[in-house]
Amino acid sequence: MNDILKIIESHNEFFKSNKTLDVKFRLKHLKSLYCAIKNNLNELHEGLKLDLGKSENESYMCETGLVLSELSHIIKNLRKYTKAKRVKTPLAQFPSKSYRIPCPHGVVLIMNPWNYPFLLSITPLIEAIAAGNTVILKLSAYSPNVNNAIINLLESVFERGYVDVVCGNSKVIANLLEQKFDYIFFTGSKRVGQIVYESAAKNMTPVSLELGGKSPCIVDQTANLPLAAKRIVWGKFLNLGQTCVAPDYILCHKSVHQQLLTEIKKQITLQFSSNPLENENYGKIINEKHFARLTSLLDNQKIAHGGKADSNRLKIEPTVLDNINFDDEIMQDEIFGPILPILTYEKDEEIISYISQNPVPLALYIFSKDKKRINRFTTELSFGGGCINDVVIHIATSDLPFGGFKDSGIGAYHGKAGFDTFTHYKSIVNKSGLIDLPMRYQPFKEIYQKLVRKIMR
């Protein structure tokens, strides 16, 4: 507790020094971070391999490469983002000019999850630093190896008081949440997100909550089934399904159910081999607790493909469950693992009714060639973001804000949206002293009031 208080005090002092208000200062550290990541890829990838079994290619494609891409985007655009923004001024305020000045919140707490421990720590950190804040980064206790790599990386770039890392269990989280921060950015479960939100409210601290939920994947009768299966299998079993935006379940039109199932089975074998448990590029479940939770969801009566598990290596095959109903246990909570349930439907109204009556998902995926149906689903259904005829890739562009909606989160980030998240905009009117129109002052004269009414219509 004393250590946490000292860290927060050092950050308040650092921020009050006004060093971070200098855009050159921010750019210098962001560029140094880019070089440090490039120079430490092996250490970072090794940590991801030990914690989650990720291959080097997957680690680069889904973690370190995405971070480097985000860094490049921010470095390229930061000067533009930090400029004051002119806005129109009403005629009634003539002569004057109006503008918005971006300024940092101050001391930011970022709390990361374990499933993408590098990506989901460093991306918000980049944007918080770009906006001129100092950052205290709380790392998940479930990913100790990549945590060590992150600590070494950040210590080589940032001085104490500017960026500090805190590790530990739920007690450490509780101690942190008792303190006053200027902004909190949390990525994780809805349960913990609610705790963070309640704690932040006590100090009137603004928050971003990046949560999760059961993200549906709709496959209609017009879809390109081989391509749909290929992309769904990739996105679902990426990181063994331990992805907040992974397709949680498939809603397949009854007329193409069997064909889609056949194509999914084929793609699992093509992408992960006939024995995925021996595939060195196929990762592992983060720990025994989550392994036990996932294996308890395997209903042998409904396994259409896969189902094998290795408790010693915490591996579960890509598994497909068929003939699933909405009331089944697998449909009650987010799966967050390599288990893919398939449900069928006949009318679009069934889909709209089911999704609308349940918590708002983080993502929605639609495989279809029917433009009217696509428009109906994307218009009538609530969700954070998503893809048409693909999955997951909407999170991989800096020009698209990423975030949840209602049950699945508050706020968004990536690129300019990330800079805005960690920024407060001061609204300023700069009024000239050369002319001072008398119409706003008492005593109010009728001739002036007629003019005011005309101007302010």
Image: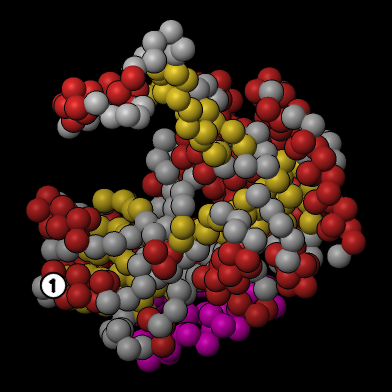
Q: Please name whichever residue, 452 or 156, is drawn nearer the observer in this view of the structure.
A: 452
Q: Position of residue 220 (x, y in %)?
A: 17, 63
In the depicted structure, whether residue 98 falls above or below residue 122? above
Q: Which residues are magenta?
A: 291-320
In the depicted structure, whether residue 187 falls above or below residue 121? below
The residue at the point 46 percent across, 40 percent down is 417
- Disc 1: CA contacts within 10 A as few (<14), some (14-19) or many (>=20): few
The residue at the point 82 percent across, 40 percent down is 13
Q: Position of residue 185 (x, y in %)?
A: 59, 54
Q: Position of residue 1 (x, y in %)?
A: 86, 65
> Which residue reaches farthest bottom?
301
In the image, residue 420 lies in the stretch drawn in magenta:
no
Mark 1 — residue? 349
- Look at the image and tell me in which quarter the C terminus lies: top left
Q: Is residue 243 left or right of residue 285?
A: left
In the depicted structure, whether residue 423 falls above or below residue 374? above
The residue at the point 58 percent across, 64 percent down is 201
